[in-house]
Image (tube, rainbow, N blue to C red):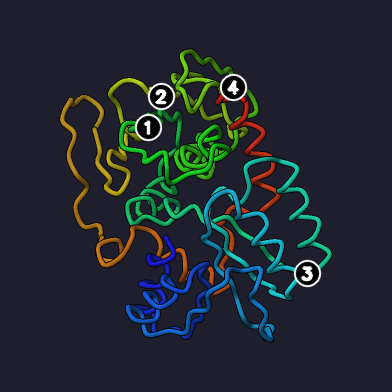
Amino acid sequence: MAKEYLRVIKKMGLHAKAVSRTKSSAESITSEFGIDCYDGGYAAFNIEIAREDVAVVCTPIETLFSCTKSLINLGFKKILVEKPGALNVSDLEELKNLADASSCEVFIAYNRRFFSSVQHLRKILATEELLAVNFELSEWTHRIILEAYSEDALKHWFISNTSHVVDLVFDIAGVSDELSCYTSGSLDWHPSASRFSGSGRSGRNILLNYIGYWDSPGRWSVEFVTADNRYILRPMEKLAVQKKGSIEISNIEGIDYSDDEICKPGVLKMMTYFLAGEYARFCDLAEQIERIKIYNKMANY
């Protein structure tokens, strides 16, 4: 993920420095992107910080919290940290208290909020009333390289990764005030559940329904239902529509996907908004604290 950010930074023509854990990865980053990269990890990172400097944290999931905490203490005032920021509420609350005391703004990087498909959908929903959202959060668990993640990150995979889908739904439809959640099954590395379903309504009176199967076929997808149309993100990078009275599902024409094709989808727009100080579309620490409480319920943690 760090290299995805570096591709975007290079594309935007920005000056940046990187910090890597090992000398070999630092040399690889310097060679590929032509920027200074320090080895030794964030704990050894100690340079003078200018007030306008910003930091992007894309360490392994289990060190996102400690790295962000270190950067706040170093004096950074704007930090974008990869999702989920931390795996539990207490760590997020500690970050929020520290950030507030240090006048530091910290946001969680959910890049799917910035997909071109989602940007276009937002414009449509500004003119049509959203009635309901159906979403699927099935994971392709057979594709996950278990050795690449810590035991804690895997046991909380709903927060570590699946939260991408729920975060997008809550961002557009509103957080659920009422949500009935059901689970069954288990995986060796995710004992709390492997199948998920639930329903409720958001604070905006929008009905929500979801399913997810981690030990059966499926995929991530979201359907936004209005009176006349059903807008479908399946895959989430593209926007399709099913019109009332028709069973046909067709891609919506005229969407400019170019930003999502030159780098990891959503990252270029996300960085553009972040560096411009346009934070309205970001998940801040206060929001993430409340949402992880819901994710815990949905995942049977």
User: Amino acid type of disc 2?
Assistant: Gly
State the image coordinates of residue 176 (x, y, percent, origin top left): 60, 30
User: Amino acid type of disc 3?
Assistant: Ser
Q: Earlier in the sequence, mark 1 or mark 3?
A: 3
Q: Is 135 situated left or right of 172 in this image?
A: left
| Residue at disc 4, secondary structure | loop
Callouts 2 and 4 close, C-beta under 8 Å: no
Callouts 1 and 2 close, C-beta under 8 Å: yes
The dot on residue 300 is: 4
Callouts 4 and 3 close, C-beta under 8 Å: no
CA–CA distance in space, label 2 to label 3: 39 Å
Callouts 2 and 3 close, C-beta under 8 Å: no
State the image coordinates of residue 241 (x, y, percent, origin top left): 25, 38
Q: Earlier in the sequence, mark 2 or mark 4?
A: 2
The dot on residue 103 is: 3
State the image coordinates of residue 237 (x, y, percent, origin top left): 30, 49
Displayed quadrant of residue 129: top left
CA–CA distance in space, label 1 to label 3: 37 Å
User: Amino acid type of disc 4?
Assistant: Asn
The dot on residue 212 is: 2
21 to 38, vertically: above or below: above
Q: Residue at x 68, y 69 (%)?
A: 71
Q: Residue at x 48, y 44 (%)?
A: 149
**Residue annotated with mark 1:** 139
CA–CA distance in space, label 4 to label 3: 35 Å
Q: Earlier in the sequence, mark 4 or mark 3?
A: 3
User: Observer-nearest residue: 243 or 24?
Assistant: 24
